[in-house]
């Protein structure tokens, strides 16, 4: 092990202790690849990552006004990434499959469950956004997002890549009446025109 790797390991072990992680368990998992210790360390890290993610989500939603900080005892993503990498390497070196707890930790750390969440948030959101955009071309991304049921970030992405404008033009060509009266695009589908 190189001097740099040794120093990284010592820093990681010190940070583990600061987070209430048993040093012997951590070193057995990270240095020696002890399967049971990898499983225990992964389970403990998963608890810490879930707590960090929950605090961050509460902050983003406005429930918490201040952002999660190191003083709150939240584990740093860089430390989790280092420990996960070391444990995966030990599993590979020992030709062992990673324990389920390590796989779950990796999933939480990488945010796999959030992949494409914005696009999946509300079925039909893109077309609701297009209709609102047609009816209110000067509306902000937040207004469009509220109507469509997605974040303003997703709306801005659709605007930037031209998807909203292109779909709007296609919709107007398919329904010429929308070109004359764009406000018809956002009539409540449950109400009749009669």
Image (cartoon, helix red, strand yellow):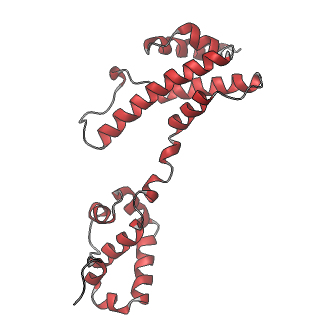
Q: How many numbered tags mark residues here?
A: 0
Residue at x 44%, y 77% (from the top left corner) = 167
* Viewport quadrant of the N terminus: top right
Query: As drawn, is 1 to the left or to the right of 58?
Result: right
Instruction: In the displayed orientation, state which residue is furthest to the top.
Output: 24
**Residue 27, how many percent across, how many down?**
61, 11
Query: As drawn, is 138 to the left or to the right of 22?
Result: left
The image quadrant that residue 3 belongs to is: top right
Residue at x 39%, y 61% (from the top left corner) = 122
Query: As drawn, is 89 to the left or to the right of 140?
Result: right
Q: Is residue 153 above or below residue 111?
A: below
* Residue 4 visible in rendering: no
Residue at x 29%, y 75% (from the top left corner) = 137
The image quadrant that residue 2 belongs to is: top right
Residue placed most toward the observer, 103 or 19: 103
Query: As drawn, is 188 to the left or to the right of 37?
Result: left
Q: Is residue 165 above or below residue 29?
A: below
Residue placed most toward the observer, 145 or 137: 145
**Residue 121, how many percent across, how many down?**
41, 57
The image quadrant that residue 24 belongs to is: top right
* Residue 180 visible in rendering: yes
**Residue 150, how many percent across, how many down?**
36, 59
Residue at x 54%, y 12% (from the top left corner) = 13
* Viewport quadrant of the C terminus: bottom left
Residue placed most toward the observer, 67 or 113: 113
């Amino acid at each position: 092990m190189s001097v740099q790797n040794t120093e990284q390991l010592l820093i990681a072990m010190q940070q583990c202790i600061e987070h209430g992680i048993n040093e012997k368990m951590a070193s057995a998992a990270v240095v020696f690849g002890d399967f049971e210790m990898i499983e225990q360390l992964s389970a403990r890290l998963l608890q810490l990552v879930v707590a960090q993610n929950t605090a961050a989500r509460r902050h983003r939603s406005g429930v918490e006004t201040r952002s999660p900080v190191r003083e709150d005892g939240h584990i740093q993503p860089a430390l989790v990434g280092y420990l996960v990498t070391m444990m995966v390497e030990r599993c590979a070196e020992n030709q062992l499959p990673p324990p389920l707890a390590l796989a779950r930790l990796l999933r939480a750390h990488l945010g796999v469950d959030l992949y494409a969440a914005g696009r999946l948030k509300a079925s039909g959101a893109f077309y609701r956004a297009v209709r609102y955009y047609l009816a209110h071309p000067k509306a902000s991304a937040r207004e469009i997002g509220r109507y469509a049921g997605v974040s303003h970030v997703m709306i801005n992405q659709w605007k930037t890549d031209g998807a909203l404008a292109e779909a709007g033009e296609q919709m107007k060509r398919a329904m010429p009446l929308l070109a004359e009266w764009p406000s018809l695009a956002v009539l409540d589908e449950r109400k009749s025109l009669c």
